[in-house]
Amino acid sequence: MNRLAMLVLVLATPAAAGAAAPALPADHVVVEATGVGEPYVAAIARTVSSARALAVEQFGFDLPDSISVLIRCAPGEPTRLWTDGQDRICLTVPSEAHLRRPAASGIFHLYGLCHEVGHLAQYRLIPRHDWMTSAAAEGWAHYLGSRLVDGVYAREGADLWPDLYDYRADGMARLKQQLAGPRRDDTVAGAGLWMDLAAAVGDKGVAPLLRAWGQVRPNPADPGPALGQALRAASPDPRVAAWWKTAEPVLVLKRPRSGFASQTVSPKDLAGRPAELALDDGTAAGKASLAGSGHAVRFEAAGDGWCVTAVAVHGSRYGGADATDEEFHVWLCDGEFQAIAQFAFPYAKFERGDPKWVLLPVPPTLVPREFIVAVAFNPTASRGVFVSHDAQGGGRSLTGLPAAPPRPSGQGDWMIRVRADQVRAARRPAAGSR
């Protein structure tokens, strides 16, 4: 049977983009495309279908029966490819010319699709992966994606991509060339470590190790010990233990605590004159959900001895089920973005629909004069929270997670505010004391 018989392809021409037929379930792949011709849609479907089959059959990963691929091609669209980490891959391009072979477009779409299947394989086993460095996450997808490119070529042959080229050059041949080169970026270094692990335990030996990691919740300040213990429990192979000694410093992100001590005080010790710290103008001009990152704002207290008592976020939840077991996190950090305290809240705090202010009370926690508040939802394309921002940024809104240098948000000010009160002078501890 023709492999395309196992796929559902839903196409809409650019003129009919607003009236695309609803996608139907399929055994392996559902492609919903707007503005892209059938040859490229079919090639994308075949690529994802074969990559999925290889990840399951050759590598033993637990991938969904059906992967949804959403393609939008329209003027002004960015060239972008990403996954929700569960069962969806999204691709946007401004024109079909951007789907041509890499030598013509400068974009490795076929490899990129295999790369995203690699992310799906990893993230489905480790849904909480904020301990991973880019070498761990992107390096894994680069390694497995390169392996899948070679496997797809063996299954689909040379004529898979409409703009024909020898796409084997984008697989392990390219990765091995990168590893042999004088300079390795984090992604290539990580890919080399994953390649070493697969060589030690075999293609089907990696998935059980990732599954073991997915069942632990390591200490964000130092995830290594819990991950190492889970690895040893999953495999007594001394080669795995030796690999971990080399891999841990590269793959694991530590979030060291701030030198400013985490201290809470009793509400009765507060002055009773609460203040709201706000940098936004109160009018939402846009919204954003940040996968693999967080929304952060740099605040300044009026002096010493101030405690944060609540954080307010303007936003709304998106996605299907309520997912009552899902949590998001709020961090109070010093001015260097090192964590002082971390608090978990249920996703249900935010409602679907129109965005609104959501108040998140925390135990009164001392902060230094300059501090950063970060909120992270670990979102996917099908589940997350949109945080609002205003139109005019003042330079204090950031993106990132604690322990890594924050970046300017590039948008208006996040609509994140702080409620604070000062400790009564007689009850005030020395600043930064432990």
Image (cartoon, grey):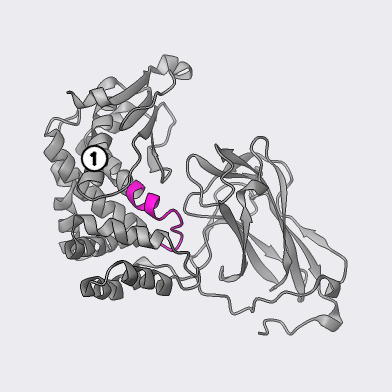
Up/down of 23 relative to 271, above or below: above
Q: Write the residue at 29% across / 76% down.
A: 245
Location of residue 8 (image quadrant): top left
Q: Inspect this view and state whether residue 165 appears.
A: no
x and y, in percent, of residue 6 in the image: 26, 26
Location of residue 389 (image quadrant): top right
Quadrant into which the C terminus falls: bottom right
Which SS class for mark 1? Answer: helix
The one nearer the camera, 224 or 292, is 224
Q: Write the residue at 21% across / 60% down.
A: 198
Q: In this view, does 172 lie to the left or right of 124?
A: left
Q: Inspect this view and state whether residue 398 appears.
A: yes
Up/down of 354 relative to 420, above or below: above
Q: How many marks?
A: 1
Magenta region: which residues?
120-132
Residue that numbered label 1 is attached to: 53
Q: Is residue 424 left or right of residue 203?
A: right
Q: Which residue lies furthest to the right in this view?
A: 272
Up/down of 308 relative to 315, above or below: below
x and y, in percent, of residue 253 in the image: 43, 67
124 magenta-colored: yes
The one nearer the camera, 340 or 15, is 340
Badge 1 local density, few (<14 within 10 Å), some, or many (20+)? many
Up/down of 46 relative to 252, above or below: above
Q: What residue type is labelled 1?
A: Ala
Quadrant into which the N terminus falls: top left
